[in-house]
Amino acid sequence: MSTADRVTTVRERIGPVGVWLGVLRTTGACASRYAAQRVEELGYGSLWTGERLGGKEPFAGAAVLLAATSRIVTGIGIANIWTRHPTVMQQGAATLHAAWPDRIVLAVGVGNAAAVNGSGLVYEKPLDHMSRYLAEMDLASGEGVGGETTPPRMVGGLRTGMLRVARDQSDGAHTFFVPPAHTERARAVVGPDRLVIPEQAVVLSTDAAWARGVAREHLSFFLRLPNLADNLRAFGYGDEDFADGGSDRLVDALVAWGDESAVARRVGEHLDAGADHVLLQPLGDVGDVVTQLDRLAPAVLGG
């Protein structure tokens, strides 16, 4: 299948809104199955979860979600390229794709230097490494798994250089921890023929102090990562915005909080900026997350 065909297939299957649940990285299998089944029942087009070094193995985790559901597309975003040989990465995705055709999207990425180096690996020349890695995945694409072995593949990218790699060597860019202004830039770089799929954190509450407090707990970890902070600097945020868990201005740009209509407006901003599909990540434990998605579904899915 060509890149154009894969992009078209993904767009048709997932629609405009899906879900990204970081909470599933630390949630047991039974609760993960429940969350996946409810997300599917509500009508969201996709369900994504990520990888954090030392946490769940994402391909096995995706298999749990796929086996528990019947139609929803499952995304891995991102699978870290430093921890797997390119052939292992390719065949992991191909195995899932062969078992559940057109229901898996793989986003690969470099992660952040501190976590990679802290795990005993070496983070260096990420653009060059990513380009070579994707080329080696391509070489492995016809080996070892029967049937169609080229599932949709995206690159987790933020800055222009990695977005160009996503454009030239994948089906598009999966972005995380970004405002709608970044989505506009990502679309401009990757062009109209590639996917742009951003994650959007959500707190469904009209209590500004409480919602921003929850948001700051979420942001505090990510703002310590230089690659994410540096990306935000390109959009006019500075040291004063990164202090104390984030300024109100930064919190409001990165976390959509308020009632259902407020969250729907933020989804619309990303779509208007060029996103194909927006991944909502409600903040909270798995029960809170499912409750928020239940409330949001009529507003964001048009039901």
Image (tube, grey):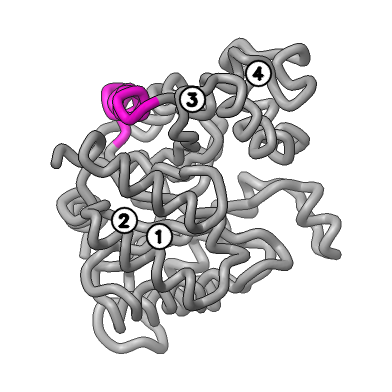
Residue carrying label 4: 233
Please state the extent of the stretch shown in magenta in the rendering.
259-275
Q: Is residue 45 above or below residue 60?
A: above
- How far is mark 1 from mark 4, CA to CA? 28 Å
> Which residue lies at the image location 85% right of the left edge and 57% below the top edge?
118
> Which residue lies at the image location 29% right of the left edge and 62% below the top edge?
73
Residue carrying label 3: 179
Q: Position of residue 4 (x, y in %)?
A: 21, 51
Residue carrying label 2: 46
Q: Is residue 158 above or below residue 6?
A: above
Q: Is residue 1 above or below residue 239?
A: below
- How far is mark 3 from mark 1, CA to CA? 21 Å
Whether label 1 touches label 2, CB < 8 Å? yes
Q: Secondary structure at mark 4?
A: helix
- How far is mark 1 from mark 2, CA to CA? 7 Å
**Quadrant in which the C terminus is drawn:** top left
Q: Earlier in the sequence, mark 2 or mark 3?
A: 2
Q: Earlier in the sequence, mark 4 or mark 3?
A: 3
Residue carrying label 1: 75
Whether label 3 touches label 1, CB < 8 Å? no
Whether label 1 touches label 4, CB < 8 Å? no
Q: Amino acid at mark 3?
A: Pro
Between 33 and 45, the one nearer to me in the picture: 33
**How dense is the environment of label 1, judged by Cα within 10 Å: few (below 14), some, or many (20 and up)?**
many
